[in-house]
Structure formats: structure tokens, C-alpha cells
Amino acid sequence: MRKLLVTLLAFLCMSGLQAGNYKSFKISVYTRAYEVEKMKDLHWLDSTWNIISSQVKVDKIYLETHRDLLIVPEETIEQAKRFFKEKGVEVGGGITYTIDESNSFETFCYSNPEHRKMVKHIAEYTAKHFDDFILDDFFFTSCKSEDEIKAKGNMSWTEYRIKLMTEAGENLVIKPAKKVNPKVKIIIKYPNWYDHFQGLGFDLQHGPQIFDAVWTGTETRNPAGDQHLQNYLSYNIIRYFENLREGHNLGGWVDAGGIEMGMDRYVEQLWLTMFAKAPEINMFAYNQLIGVPINEAVHRTKWQGQGTSFNYDEMMKPVNLNGKGMTTPTTMARAAGYAFEQIDKFVSMLGKPIGIKSYKPFHSLGDDFLQNYLGMIGLPMDMVPYFPTDQKMVLLTEQAASDPNIMAPIKKQLMAGKDVIITSSLLSAIPEKIAEVSELRCNDLRAIVNDMGYNGKTKKDILIPQVLYHTNDAWEMVSAGRPLTGGVSGYPILLRAPYAKGNMYVLTIPDDKGNLYDFPEAALNTIRRIMSPDMKVRIEGPSKVALMVYDNDMFIVESFNDEPVNVKAVLGKDYNTLEEVTTGAILEKDKAAPVIPMRRSRNMVEENRFSMTIMPHSYKVFKIK
């Protein structure tokens, strides 16, 4: 019996699983050097920690040693460590390698000898005080000093910076830190703009292998902001980084960005991170959790009171979390606490997330962040750095053009009777290679469309590239014109080109990727059906509704719309009921289940549909029965 317990404890330690405040995830807080430096004042430390701990349960805190050339004194670091450990909170370290964050995120110049010396010193200093530490977003370089220009030589900036930062990671951070503290674990936190990493030196091919683990920036904030990131990225990016080195993506990271859109936008980022099964989520940062007050005029959205997943009025009720009496919520910390308490009821029940495999070669560029837009139209995404060989359907965006041998796995997939779907951008990038399968073209001409025939009309005029093909060599599955019905011209939105036993599909991507949200429901339903042969479930309905699927017959449907939407979950004929996990309600299949012709076959496929209404910015969790 004792031997069994010892084995179990060893397994838990290796897995990083520890008892905490929640069933299957940990909650942590990152603290900038500015606030750590203030922790020399124990009164300030105790009073501010009370603001946070009275509103959200925290398992771990990360104390930053450096940011913007501010190095926190040793005595302050050690005092803060003792304080939190006495509170039963785990403590880790952090580093932000910036010279002046306010100056367009001014980074170190890693060819400058003095800068290199300082980078190394900061790593050694941090390892002396912590057994694990995180490198915040900024372990990249945007420096174009004369030294860097000379060192770059004839290399491209991307080639030079990848080489430079990989070397700096090994020789200025990892090796020096581990020499000081052999047991230290060094974690690199990658930010949310993953499609552009290579241009500033982040190396996703080697970085996850040389660092002990990675963290993931899941902040999507306001899509109208500088980065224009879609909500779904908060889920999708966790999965992508996990696929870089399985079991080494330790957590997600969300800040207060987007909170001006309503408190729903903030907590949505938190729960999407956890729906992707992140082991831990970090709230950035200590100063925001104490300094961003709840403002009903801003944070209580117009759709509250409709039974939404985030209930502002429930969140505002007094709570007693730290045993010091009832606390009335005052800052964004309580919104986070409320969200975690909600999802803790079911996140532990979710299996491993699965989705439509999309091959993104290392350091590739093209169709920037497209998978997040596709996630927003109900296609569960699963980005991988290799061409998957075990899928009935593989998605290839323009990113795949960076693989010089891309046609070999495409042909192998098709010869095996399986399918690929490429974007119009990939076709435009490598037309000669694609012609080995089908002589398709995507030239510089554009068309304005607003009608998809029997699939319905678009919400607005849409500008699309013109995909051209040989008549009877390829077939339009979804077409568009202005108008299409009664018009004089039309263009493929979804095109099928048979090859051997399989099909290569072309999905036309509008010039503005956001116009995917303007596609009519019927067109979206056809695209979802064609792209989802590996999924046990798909959805039908409007855009801006996401589907997250798990390998244990569970799935989540989440709406990002401002109004209630009607959605159908589509399953095979053998599945007659769904259990709504959060309420225990049982959904029966719709009485009238349409019969859909199978593609490339005269056979018919019977499917069952389950109707549901999803409230604004809300989710429902289901178990297939």
C-alpha cells in the first residue's frame, strides 16, 4: 500500500498536479517589478493582497525581478516571498527583458556586449531567488541599431533574429541560470501574435525544446485594438502551443485589455483559456487586480438579465473567500473569481480538445490568424507544426506554401481516399504546384458578391478573389455572385477538385477575413459539413458561434453574438439525446431530421439534430449520450 502511495505521489509531482483551490486548474497572479518593489512596505503589501485574496482564490504568485532596467532589491524579494508562503501561496519568479516598455516596447539589443552582460546578470540574479521563473512577452528583439545591422550581414531580419534569440536564450539565460541554481525551471511566455513571431526572433521550432516549458498569451482584448485578434484565439493558441511540445504548455495569460467592452469580454478570455485545458491561468497583473475598479456603467452589458453565462448581478454579491468576513466586490479580481468558480464545476470533466487539423510549418507566414476567424464560424481548429497523416480532412492555408515539399503529403492524402482543403491564398501562392492535382488559378482579379443562391444572401457586399477552374474538372459546392440568382456571373466560394480517391477543396477567403462572418447560414453549414468528417459533432447556425470538441464525447457551443441565436448540434443517427452538463437537462433530437446526400456518393446519410438557443456571449456544455 505504501509503495502504491509513493508511486502515486511521484506521478503527481511529475505531472505538475497539485492540490489547489480548484479541481483541475491553478490560478496565479503575475506581479510587475514596479509592484514587487513596493512590497518593501509590508502595510502596502498586506492591504493590497487583501483586496485580491478577498475576491479571487489564488494558488501561486510570480514576482518579477526586472522590468525597464528596474531590478528589485534582494531584501524586498525575500520579504515578499516569505509573506506569500506564510499565506499558503506558491511563489515563482519573473523577468521582463525591456529597456523601456513605454517606448514602443524597447527591447535589449542582443549583439551589444553591454546588453548581453545585463541580460545574463538578470537571469543569474533571478535564479538565485526562485526555483522557477517566467520570461514575460518581451524575450524578442526589435532593435535595429548599427551593431545589429552590421551583425545581420546578408541575412534577412527574420533569419538573423531567430538565430540571435535562440543563441541568447541558451547562452545568456538558460545556462547561466542553471549554473547558479541547477534545479531552476525556466519558462518562456509566448505572446498572442504567434503568426509574426519569427520576424522578431521567437523560435517556435527550437524554443519549446530548449526551455523547460512555455506559457501562452491568451489575451484577445478588443478586436478593434492594434492587434485585431479574434475572440477564438484565446482557445486556439493554447492548443497550438501544446502541439509544439505536448505536455509542456503550462498555462494561459490574460490581462484587463478589452474590459472597456464590458466585463463579459474580460471573463470570456479567462474561460476560453480554460476550455482549452490549460493547467494554469495567470492574471496579469497585480496592479490591475487592485487598481481596475468595477464600473457598472461600463462593465454591465446591455444583454445582462437574459440568463447569460456571466451574470453581472450574481458576481456583485458579497463573498467570504479568505475567512475575514463578507467582502463586497470592488475590482476586476471578483469578476475573475466568479468566472473560475463557475467553470470549475465542469472543466475537470472535459477530455482532450480535438479539432480540424491545420498544418502550420514553423516560421510560416500567410493568411494571418485565419484559423481564429474559422473558429468564429463554428469550425473547431487544431493547428499543428507537421502534416497530419491520420485525418480524413486536413486544412492548408497560405502558411503551407513555406513547405517546399508540400505536394508530396497532399498527394499521399488524396491517393488514400482522404481530403484536403486549401485556401484561395495558398492556391495563389503556389499555382504551379497545385496544378499537379488540378489546374486551378487564382489571379489578381477580384469580384464583389452578395448572393449565394439557394444558400442565401450575404449580410453585405463582399470582395473576393476570383478562383478559376476548367469546367467539369472541378465543381462548385457553394457559389456567389451579385446577384447569383438571375445574375450574369458567379464565382466559387467552395470548390471541389477530385483526384484519385480523394478531393481537394478550395475555400475562397474574402479580402477582409471578417467577411466570413457575413456568409449566410446555409453556406456556412455546407462548409462546416465538408470540413468536419473527423468530428463526431458539428453545428448549424449563424456565424460568431464557436464549437469546442473533446475526445470523451463532450463539446461546448459558445456564442460571441450580442443577441440570442438558434443553433443546431448535428450528430450521427445513433445519438438520440444530449445532456446539458451545467443544468443536467436532456435534449431530445429534433422530430424532423433532414436526410443529407453524402458527397461523391448516391448514398444518403442520416443525422440527428438537436436545437438550442445560446444567449449573448454565453456557452453551453454537452455530453453526447
Image (cartoon, grey):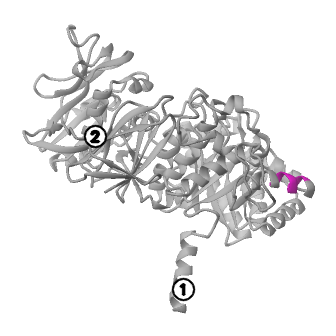
Q: Quick one: SS at disc 1?
A: helix
Is residue 354 found inside the magenta-colored segment of the image?
no
- Amino acid type of the residue tagged 1 in the rendering: Leu
Apparent side of residue 127 relative to residue 408 in the rendered image (left or right):
right
Q: Mark 2 or mark 1: which comes first in sequence? A: 1
Magenta stretch? 44-49
Q: Nearer the viewer, residue 166 or 566?
A: 566
Height in image: 275 above or below 458?
below
Q: Nearer the viewer, residue 287 or 473?
A: 287
Is residue 48 found inside the magenta-colored segment of the image?
yes
For the C terminus, give its image quadrant: bottom left
Principal secondary structure, stretch drawn in magenta: helix
Q: Quadrant of residue 613?
A: top left
- Label 1 crowd bin: few (<14), some (14–19), many (20+), radius 10 Å: few
Q: Quote the CA–CA distance across marks 2 and 1.
A: 46 Å
For label 1, the residue is: 5
The x, y position of residue 131, in whole percent, is 70, 68
Residue located 63% across and 33% down the image:
262
The reply to whether the C-beta atoms of the residues labelled 2 and 1 are less than 8 Å apart is no
The x, y position of residue 414, in whole percent, is 18, 45
Q: Which mark is residue 125?
A: none
Q: Nearer the viewer, residue 87 or 324?
A: 324
Residue located 55% across and 63% down the image:
24
